[in-house]
Amino acid sequence: MQRLCKIVSTLVVSLVLIGGAAAQTSWIMRGFDTNRTGANDQEKVLKPTNVNSGQFGKLFSRAVDGQIYAQPLIVPGVIIPTKGTFTVAYVATMHDSVYAFDAENAGNGAPLWKRSFVDESKGITTIPYQFLTGFPDIHPEVGIVSTPAVDVANQLLYVVVRTLEGDGNVDASYHQRLYALDLRTGVTKLGPKELTAKVPGTGDGSVNGFVNYDERRQNQRPALVLNAGKLYIASASHGDNGPYHGWILCYDAKTFKLLGSYCSTPNAGLGGFWMSGHAMPIDAQGNLYAVTGNGNFNPLASNFGDSVLKIDGTAMAVSDYFTPYNQANLEGWDADLGSCGAILIPGTNLVVSGSKEGKIYVTDRTNMGHFDAASDDHIYQWWWACNGHMHGTPAFWQGGTGNKNLYAWSEGDTLKGFKFDGSKFTTTPFATSAMQAPPGMPGGFITVSSNGADSSSGIVWTTLPFTGDANWNTVPGVLRAFRATDLTELWNSHIADEDDFGSFAKFNPPVVVNGKVYVPTFSNELAVYGLLPATPPSAPAAVKAEGGSGEVAVTWRTVRGAASYEVRRGPVGGPYVKVGTTTTESLYLDKTVTNGTTYAYVVVAKNPYGTSESSVPSSATPAASIPDAGTGLTAAFYNDPADGRHFVTPALKRLDATVDYDWGDGSPDPLVQTDKFSAQWYGMVSANQTGYYTFQTVSDDGIRLWVRNQLVVDNWTDHGPATDLSKPILLVAGRRYPIQMEFYENGGGAVARLLWNGPGTGGPVAIPTTNLFPYGNTTPPEDGVVDLASQFNIDGMSFAARTQDGDIGFKGQTYAAETMIDTWSVGGTIPVLHVLGPKDVAGKNVIGCDGRTMVVPVYNAQMVSLLGCSVNGFQSGTFKFNYSDGTTLTQTIRFTDWGAPSPRFGEAMAARFSKRHGPAGDVVAITSLYQYRVLTDKTKRLISITLPNNPDIKILSLSIRR
């Protein structure tokens, strides 16, 4: 059993008035209502006409202490003692904390209250994932996994907390405890109640004829279900690590007395309730609908693996079920039926569920169909809906006449909509999205909003990976909004850099309520979106002009609130005149240029409320390209020792025309050992057409890829065949850019493929030989500018209007972003190019050193250059520069305080400013930025740098000189 999906509802969530506030809509359970439809039809603010790049965007975020697997819950009118009445966002984290935040006011960022269940002084911690399973599906820790449930009438929040007590070895004890917390204070009102149960059976892990609930093995992933005074708690496993079963425990919500329990495989094993974290729907008669994953199926023995179950919520027993005809194959192929949850279609007796196969099943609650070994044609309806595994439960929207629609988005496929005519579903999609989900886990997670049945107000909201496979990895995420009637994309969180929420939260759809969209993340924050203030946008940042042959490509960082951009051109120093416009695209290609002439460009942003100031200008000189064809990349192969190091013993060096290999269980060459080898490919890449290219790797095992000296793919782990994608990267036709890929094999199969997808490529294909160049005698590539933001959470610069964004660690003060430039070359005998992190992304520009190790992209390096400073006085820290042969250069560097009038320890002054930002606005103070240089051994390959463990040392930029 691996994954389950979502669940949809029929009962409508009522408006609440706990403290006399104006009526607003609550979101108090996963899936919005008891049918788990995922559709809020009480949204009166957001609509397709105002969800666009000029009016909608990220408003603020709320910082928390861990990943957010639980769907946030929103309750209006909560009276917080001594603080007032608020619409409250309740957020539970994997670090075993529950937060109550002001859900509306951007400036009130501190928690209204926080409740932590960790007490390290007593040995009570979250659970390291390695203590539960060898698979990092969930990592690094397990705490509160499931979505809580809210009882508005009694002002309670129910939550299951998982803890480890002891050291995880001999004296360890694993606990799952149920609590009821006061919505107003976080104080425990009931509990803790240890989750325990047993049923008669001889299945996996049974003792003396009973199967016991195992608090270590059971993964309490599905959302809690509160109904008619009863609380239902379901669970599955961690990475199929047994013995485990599918369990549902039923408690009295007022006393926590165990009223009953159900086990899906009491005389076998597996059959977990996972459902990708979604909640079980429940009908008016109190019947639960749940879907099991891989497991034994034998109704005569009460074993129900890979089945859709109707469970009597009082008797806690199966009253009806459906099992696919190919259940044995599903179990054998790890093709869980239970990768999705179930939903109930309002006004009907129909239950809808999905599957890893991509099929959607529709069963009749009054006669679900049981099992037929010949086929599934006896059930109400089924069809092949998706081309990949379905993990997000389909969502259902009643959008008026002709717009009763079911939406589903599997991995590696498009978002699809299916019409419901009141009786049957049309199995051909009425609309699909223009883009696909990435080919890896887990597809899209869907919420629908509308103002009643007004079809013109419907929006389909989704969260999904932006790139990469989220199965075992933390990957960038994206929030997308589509018109519900035709699935035209209205907006997404990658149009403007400031709208990016960071890392995707697996299996967790957005919450859309009261004019705001709440997005849980794995970036340790809750991101909140809504309508932007009616003001002109700010000026675009990081404008860069790059000359090609007969063209200049102008790029910039997109700006929140911009509906369009105007590009202006002139001689260096101006004046500038309009040459073109774009809508939300941050690339303009100027083909009205002459090779050899220098042009300067500025960009302004526009929206319905006005035009921004001009950007900082950037200039470029187009030039004719060299009309020669590439010959491939330099390839170097190494035989690795048993200690896990790579690139140690050279075995073979050659020129590879392309990188498109599947060696199976073999090796690249007789000189290279079959298992435990590593490889590097390096050189230059050139495009035939200017535009954005996505680079794609397929690997078994570890892979890393740098393009333009930016680490764009990093899956440096043992794994089976996996596909990883880069963010889009600009390549100007005819120009050559550094590219480097690294790979290692640690046993079993060996796959290493390098592909791209961009203008004229015809889809993801192996990069052709003619577009790849070994270094040879060509000019060495530019300095390697390390993308700090790709490896760290960083802070330290802010704009004047948003001083809360950054904090350098000194009295809440930050560098003033408007005084900084994006790129500059720091002088000396060896000038080095430095690039700052994004100033226009809240809180992500400066590293506070914390002892971590960062991967660097350069093959050989003669120098490392840092831009940084210290705070709270002069500081020193020891850096370790790690080489591929296992040796390390250790260097202690003394840093000068950013407020000192001049450098103290021989470093260079990179820049000096007359002000900084503080909590109350501008602070007039000398503020300096320094350059620190370390000479490295250029005969060795530098592979990583270990930072000192001193957070008072701050780094804004790091570059490597070849």
Image: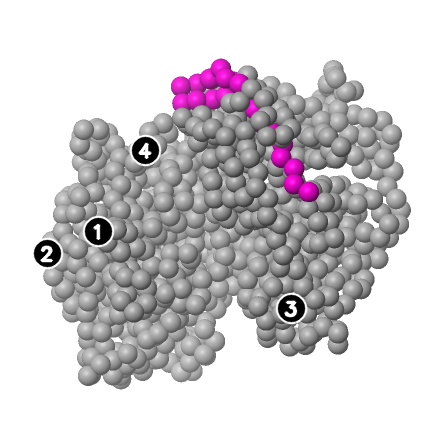
The residue carrying pointer 3 sits among few (fewer than 14), some (14 to 19) or many (20 or more) residues within 10 Å by Cα, namely: many
Q: Is residue 402 visible?
A: no
Q: Are marks 3 and 1 in contact (CB under 8 Å)?
A: no
Is residue 838 left or right of 389 when viewed as pictured?
right
Is residue 622 left or right of 389 when viewed as pictured?
right
Q: Earlier in the sequence, mark 3 or mark 2?
A: 2
Q: Please state the horizontal and vertical placement of residue 114, each as a whole percent of the image.
A: 27, 41
Q: Quadrant of the C terminus?
A: top right
Q: Earlier in the sequence, mark 1 or mark 4?
A: 4
**Viewer-side label of 3, 4:** 3
Q: Please state the horizontal and vertical placement of residue 202, each as a whole percent of the image.
A: 25, 83
Q: Gap between marks 3 and 4, in whole Å?
A: 50 Å
Tag 1 residue? 158
Residue 578 part of the magenta-drawn span: no
**Viewer-side label of 3, 1:** 3
Secondary structure state at the residue bearing disc 2: loop
The residue carrying pointer 4 sits among few (fewer than 14), some (14 to 19) or many (20 or more) residues within 10 Å by Cα, namely: few
**Viewer-side label of 1, 4:** 4
Tag 4 residue? 110
Tag 2 residue? 255
Is residue 152 left or right of 588 when viewed as pictured?
left
Tag 3 residue? 640
Name the dominant secondary structure of the magenta segment: strand
Q: Amino acid at mark 4?
A: Ala
Is residue 714 left or right of 597 when viewed as pictured?
left
Residue 135 occupies quadrant: bottom left
Q: Gap between marks 2 and 1, in whole Å?
A: 12 Å
Residue 115 occupies quadrant: top left
